[in-house]
Amino acid sequence: MKNKTFQSLTNPLAKNNPVLVQILGICSALAVTTQLKPALVMGLSVTAVCAFSNLVLSLLRNGIPDRIRIIVQLVVIAALVTIVNDVLKAYVYDVSKQLSVYVGLIITNCIIMGRVEAFALSNKPLPSLLDGIGNGIGYGAVLVIIGFVRELFGNGSLFGYQIIPECFYEAGYVNNGLMLFPPAALIIVGVIIWVHRTANKDLQEK
Amino acid sequence: MKQNYNKPLPKRLLDKFAPTFSEGGKLSWLHSFYEAMETFFYVPTDVTKKGSHVRDCNDMKRTMFMVIIALVPTILFGMWNIGFQRIGGADFSIWQNFWFGFWKMLPSILVTYIVGLSIECAFAQIRKEEVNEGFFVSGILIPLIIPIGTPLWMTGLATAFAVVIGKEIFGGTGMNIFNPALLARLFIFFSYTSSISGESVWFTDGRTGATALGELANTGQLPEGFSMLDAFVGNIAGSIGETSTLCILLGAIVLLATGTASWRTMISVFVGGLVMGGIFNLLAPAAPVTPTEHYLALPAWQHLLLGGFAFGAVFMATDPVTSAQTNAGKCIVGFMIGALAILVRVFNTGYPEGMMLAIIFMNALAPVVDHYVVQANIKRRNRRAKKTVNA
């Protein structure tokens, strides 16, 4: 039992990653990953929302009538997203401005609703909380990888600090503008999925 | 092994090293490379062992070679034109200009072939397949469609992108959705926009100036003193392969005479361009004021001589893998490529050359077009069959 609980935290990190295996949450992966910092903040925000919505709805799961469960879920998720949005505005205002509508759009992130429907409504609070954290981190990790590649090659910097030295530019190096377009994120997601499937042979479709 | 001295040298060498490269040999990890060299020099002796198979001497290697032959006039002219376009190029002799351009162009040809072929070999080796010949054409097309001033590392990176993302992940030669050579250009265009458009990239030795299309995108008018004869012969600024419509037509004759490329695609691209250009001419006001209005008034036939239109129509749109497979589909796709190219040129001044985007776009739509052509054919035949039964 203990082991199974722990697995609900580790499974979504790689084996059942929401982005790489279930292909969920792609739209925000394209939108907020031109730089590393917003990608990291977005990952943390989704982790917080996902974890607590799973926890709250798992606690309420026996009291929610089946017919109106979607409405109840939305109320909980929307409340959490509003809190996250206000926290971001209070403490990291510049990132919050960069993320703009995408923080609010966490409500519509398929991962959160998906985990609540698929896991929290039929499991106890502790595994649900861990599952939420695991999925949030699994999503955030992919975002951070994409943000890392896009900021490094698109801007030559990481977290806003110049990484590629000036002498490279003098020698003729040019930042890759394609990396700043959304299609680049899609291509990087594809490459990550490629590597991921190569490492996990049982995930390969026949 | 006893050597047979009646055989020519390459064959002897190949035979001598055969055990080294076959399974269990020291260099078995390079087997696909050995195999490629062997079939490059000699017609393979192996035949398929089961099932039906088309027996024809015109295999993929020979088809690809035909395209290379068709490209020869364009390549030679392009090399001369590099020299001719430099400062004072007109004062040098034909040979001086040609050698100047030859040495300017050789590095980028080498880079594309080395990068592209090593990636292809690596993938073939990992997948235990044979190396395909598809890259022989792409490898020469890439240097022809980028500006001469493109840095070599960009050329190499774009080639790697085109081969890996555009071709190998779809399953290699014959499975790709997009034309790999155009994908390489697309990569440079979107990644390093400043190095493929603007004024300084089309010439060597510090001379600057916009291409005719660049000028058109800005002002809607051709540069002063620009003659259509020059655009036809090709001694103008532009990517190496695209300037000379005359040499491209020579290549087109070779491709059509040998049946390598589809005349349906080729002609319908030109028709599409003419029709779209004609429509724009009708739309153009009598006294044009804005750049776009000036551009609308540009005679339709002049569009076909400018930029990469002819090169795209003859060598890119006709790619048998990425174009439509049905005859009607080829006509539709070709027409749309021509029409879209002119549409992008005139109305989106951010993209002075619409041909690349038009071909890539129609590459993506070609399977859909094919699907509906086949469905329409099935429907028509069903109706005819019903009529006969009822009658």
Image (cartoon, rainbow, N blue to C red):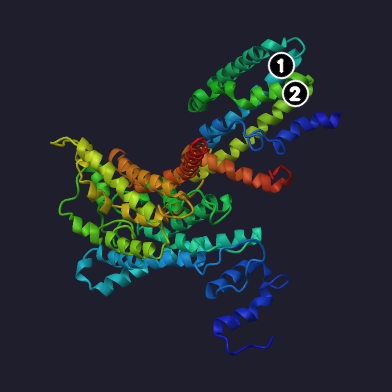
> How crowded is the residue under tag 2: few (<14 C-alpha within 10 Å), some, or many (20+)?
many
Position of the N terminus of chain B by quadrant:
bottom right
Secondary structure beneath disc 2? helix
Identify the residue at the far right of this view: A1
The spot of residue A179 in percent (x, y) is: 48, 42
Query: Which disc is residue A128 wearing?
Result: 2
**Residue at 53%, 55% in the rendered image:** B174
Secondary structure beneath disc 1? helix
**Vertical arrangement, residue A102 with respect to residue B154, above or below:** above
Looking at the rendered structure, whether the residues under marks 2 and 1 are on a common chain is answered as yes
The spot of residue A39 in percent (x, y) is: 56, 33
The spot of residue B282 in percent (x, y) is: 20, 37
Q: Is residue B295 left or right of residue A192?
A: left
Identify the residue at the far bottom of this view: B5
Q: Is residue B294 left or right of residue B38?
A: left
- Tell which of A14 and B288 is nearer to you: B288
Q: Is residue B354 left or right of residue A110?
A: left
Q: Which residue is mark 1?
A: A57
Q: Which amino acid, by three-letter code, is at mark 2?
A: Ser
Q: Which amino acid, by three-letter code, is at mark 1?
A: Leu
